[in-house]
Amino acid sequence: MDLNRMWSSNRPLKKSYDAVIIGGGVHGLATAYYLGKRGVRNVAVIEKRYIGSGASGRNTAIVRANYRTSEGIAFYAESVQLYEALSKELNYNVMFSQQGHLTLGHSDRSMNTLRERAETNRLMGVNSTLVGPEEIRRMVPPINIDHHTRTPILGALYHPPGGIIRHDAVVWGYARGADRMGIELHPFTTVTDIRVEAGAVSGVVTDRGEIQTRAVLNATAGYCSTIAKMVGVDLPIVSHPLQALVTEPMKPFISKVLVSSNLHVYISQSDRGEFVLGAEIDPYSCYSTRSTLPFLEGCAGHALEILPDLHKVRVLRQWAGVCDMTPDFSPIIGEVEEVKGFYVDVGWGTYGFKAGPVAGYRTAELIATGKVPDLIKPFALNRFHEDRLVGEKAAAAVSH
Ligand code: PYC
């Protein structure tokens, strides 16, 4: 009997698949799931560790679509729509709590940026408005709107559809859904090389044997450059740690996601009552996922400027993940021009989890049909050679 209740385990690797997905996080699993729904089911998902062990299990589970560029807004808006329907789609409760998302501005400069985002969001049909300090306090009574602080709150970008989700449930739901369609999940399997013949992918070498395939998707986070190098492709990516922490659980205290565009801190309260906090990426590039005391001090200090009543709440746990940053703070999605059959869904910086459904849905469409969906065209790798950047830095408030 298979003791793993969610999906089949310990399957042998087959000699060939129609597609091999490297990375068993939300992006790889969502792509597998939507490939399955399109009838492409001879697919293997290869994951180096356990399912959901990378960025998918390390993020702070914020979902929103209030980006800056028309390309980014359209893309994330579809992701929010897919998230809204996901519990029903997967028949698995992903606990999407659309409680609303406030990006606080503490300077004229940041208020101008938030105003520009509100306008562009509305033009693209995404619900975002600017609100003032009194309205913010009505929504979040414990917030400190005192004007005499170092970083007074001048206003906020309010995005009602934004919220938080149970990130493990999303991963498990997609994994279970893919498994039920016959797609194979292979955790604890390491890809050591990718075979290329006459400019096209021909196979994948793993520590459990070699597989033939004509389609490989690099859906990894943290190590996407290492995988891309296996086919001779250099990605314009620098990896940085991103840290987070969770406190002991409290009674319901805030019912909105709070993000500060100047202090680079974000705070939400989970359904269990814990406060989940994070900060900007660490200022150095490395692959370490060790937690640090300076992060704890800085993040707690910034959070207390916004919510002083948290001062006696105890921190339970810290953790970190690795974020792949691109020069324009947008992802890289599509088939790589130089190597036929090599697809990437990478460069997700600090904004990957919220994009899992749309990235999976559209990447599956690309692999299954060979046609590039309009929504992912702007994120092709060649934009860096063609001067077509999609600048999202101002809307990725924690990636500076
Ligand atoms: O982009 O909303 C975001 C985010 C929150 C935490 C990390 N990134």
Image (spheres, rainbow, N blue to C red):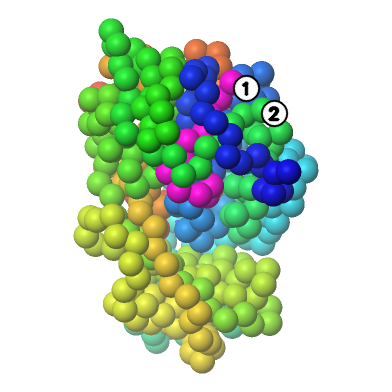
Q: Mark 2 points at which residue?
A: 181
Answer whether labels 1 and 2 touch (C-beta < 8 Å). yes
Specify the segment rendered in magenta. Answer: 42-52
Left or right, 92 with reference to 255: right
Q: Mark 1 points at which residue?
A: 41
Element class at badge 1: loop
Between residues 385 and 191, which one lies in front from this camera angle?
191
Q: Which of marks 1 and 2 is nearer the N terminus?
A: 1
Whole-number angstrom distance, CA of label 1 to CA of label 2: 7 Å
Task: Residue lying at the far top in this picture: please name it.
Answer: 198
Above or below, comparing residue 223 to residue 334 in the picture: below
Residue drawn where x is 67% and y is 48% of the image: 4
Where is residue 350? Give x, y as percent. Answer: 41, 52
Residue drawn where x is 50% and y is 49% of the image: 50
Residue 221 lies in the magenta stretch: no
Task: Residue lying at the far bottom in this picture: please name it.
Answer: 312
Above or below, comparing residue 180 to residue 120 in the picture: above
Left or right, 28 with reference to 348: right
Between residues 231 and 209, which one lies in front from this camera angle?
209
Left or right, 104 with reference to 163: left
Q: Which amino acid does label 1 sit on?
A: Arg
Quadrant occupied by the N terminus:
top right
Please tell me whether the stretch drawn in magenta is mainly helix, strand or loop: loop
Label 2 CB, ligand 1: below 8 Å? no
